[in-house]
Amino acid sequence: MAESITYREYGAAAVDYFSAAQPSRAPSLPEEKVRPQQKREVRVKAKATVAPLSVLGFGIALVMLILVVFGYVRLYEASSRHASLSRELQELKAENAALSNQYEGQVDLAHVESVAVSELGMQKGLAEQTVYLDLSRASDQGIVFAAPKQDGILRTAYESVRESIAGLLEYLK
């Protein structure tokens, strides 16, 4: 009958207990030598360097931030100016309506008619002179044609460029 062999492990090597060539105990390791430690004080100074590209990026970001802030300031000024002009426009419209009513109330139609008859020689129309127009069947449209300009193409191009530059300069003010 085959004999059972038992192996025991010491480190990475398996040991056969039944073999006479193997020692009965594990091999000993060499003694560890303790080195005396020297106490040294090491000072490390880190050199602070700044990359030029990061300075450039920070500068560009700062300029853009300033431009955005100034843009918001201009927008606020324009909005407040618009609001004040809107209030002024409403006040002027109300004043215009009041003055128009006052003016129309002072017009004397009898005086206008007497001046028209006596000084201008106008006459009041008779009943047979009255003409009635029936506009219910006519179209309610009016067409107005503007006279064509006789400017040359160079003059038109010059005016376009001049208006564009004037608009740009006004925007930058």
Image (cartoon, rainbow, N blue to C red):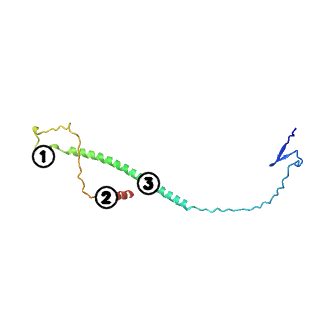
Residue type at the position of mark 1: Ala
Disc number placed over residue 61 in the picture, else none? none
Tags 2 and 3 touching, CB below 8 Å = no
Disc assigned to residue 157: 2
Q: Which residue is drawn at 41% across and 52% down?
A: 75
Query: Left or right: where does residue 13 sit relative to residue 63?
Result: right
What kind of element bears circle 2?
helix
Dot 1: few (<14), some (14–19), or many (≥20) neighbours within 10 Å?
some
Q: In which quarter of the image is residue 168?
A: bottom left
Q: For marks 2 and 3, give the CA distance.
A: 32 Å
- Front disc: 2 or 3: 2
Amino acid type at circle 3 is Gly
**Marks 1 & 3, CB-CB < 8 Å contact:** no
Q: Residue at label 1?
A: 116
Q: In this view, does 132 lie to the left or right of 32?
A: left
Closer to us: 32 or 24: 24
Q: Mark 3 points at which residue?
A: 71
Closer mark to the observer between disc 1 and disc 3? 3
Q: Which residue is drawn at 46% across and 56% down?
A: 67
Q: How crowded is mark 3: few (under 14 residues within 10 Å), some or many (20 or more)?
A: few
Decide which of 31, 8 is in the foreground and name it: 8
